[in-house]
Amino acid sequence: MTNPLTEQFSAPLTFNWTLSYRCNFTCSHCYSREEQCDELSTAELKLIVDRLAEHQVPFINFGGGEPLIREDIFVLSDYARQQGLNVSMNSNGWLLDRTAAERIKASGFRSVGISIDSAEARLHDDFRNRPGSFERAVNALDELSAVGVRSTMSAVISRINYQHFHELLDLAREHKVSQVYLHNFKCSGRGFKNRQELDLSPQEWKDFYLEALQVKEETKDLLISFDDPVIASLPGYAEKSLVKGSSCGKLSLHLRPNGDITPCGFIPLVVGNILHDDFEEIWYNSPVLNKMRNKEAKGKCQGCGAYEDCLGGCTARAFATTGDLSEPDPHCWK
């Protein structure tokens, strides 16, 4: 899927697709809770699937908002599967009962991620601003297991859980989860407003990753994953990824509910519309995407020996806090 003339993929590997910004939660860190956007019809959504299949995009991941709020998600998933795409979803779990789990299986989802941010029900419920959400999320994992759908668990690392992520791993084992994603705090949307209360200091991020990477190395019964490019600046970090720095705009793109394309859900810069614009023109020639793919070292990144590995860390976090895609990641401890 690479183009030798541009030395980049000929299309993203994944489109993270927000079908709706509507949600039944008001989470403290949410990037999208205060976003508003027109939604497309089922027929228009199928046209988007056709476009993605035409350009050989292999993966779609539905997020939100809460993707299960749209009933036609099952029709859309089934249609995408028929077009040869692999479909997954991230959900808060509230609407995922046995009936929903059976429909998820029937419509061809490869996996479903459930968001759980603390193994302590009270802390999770407070973080998600929804009493009973922990119980519903755990039940969703059990329902997925019961019908044979692969489940993953997502936790946004913040001040409420960074010292207790071991308990999250134990919870995953208890409910037959195959993979746990320990996501970095993005500082976008409500996450920016609540940053002082929830985010860690750079030194705390470094200490967390050193411990978590050691746990990952020692853990054989559970896959532990991270999505933070700033980790690459740690001495001795040897894991290889397909691209250096942030993957958004290189391996993945984001679709808003109206078909607008942004580099990722956390960077609200529209680079085109999947239904109305030429996709190859966007993918190869978008000034925003090309700036993200060719970042220039600024500030303390200039002259830093780790820059060629982390490329300034998380582009979304830099943009959220400075308004500049090339500024250093505020989580960087160097």
Image: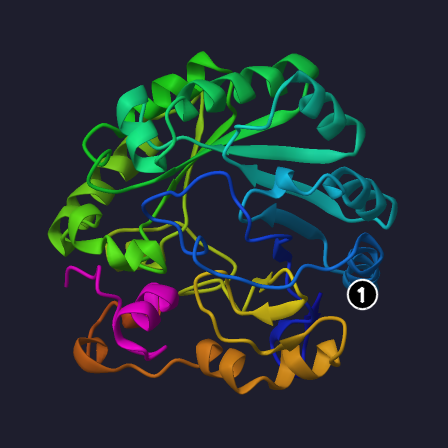
Which residue is pictured at 21% across the width and 65% down the height?
Answer: 330
Res 17 visible: yes
Query: Where is residue 163 shown, x and y percent of the image?
Result: 18, 32
What residue do we see at 78% from left, 62% from top?
Answer: 48
Amino acid type shown at disc 1: Arg
| Residue 89 against residue 235 in the figure, above or below | above
Residue 56 position, x and y percent, is 78, 61
Extreme-right residue of the structure: 82
The residue positioned 34% from the left and 35% from the top of the image is 129
Q: Is residue 314 magenta?
A: yes
Q: Which residue is mark 1?
A: 51
Query: In the rendered image, which quarter is residue 274 located in?
Result: bottom right
- What residue is rendered at 53% in x and 78% in y? 289
If the image is split into quadrants, where does the C terminus sit?
bottom left
Q: Find out whether residue 17 is within the magenta segment.
A: no
In the picture, measured across the screen, residue 303 lies left or right of residue 110, that is: left
* Whole-percent x, y for residue 43 in the image: 85, 56
Q: Quadrant of residue 193?
A: bottom left
**Relative vertical location of residue 97 with respect to residue 246 in this rendering, above or below:** above
Q: Is residue 5 above or below residue 231?
A: below
Majority secondary structure of the magenta segment?
Answer: loop
Magenta residues, start to end: 310-334
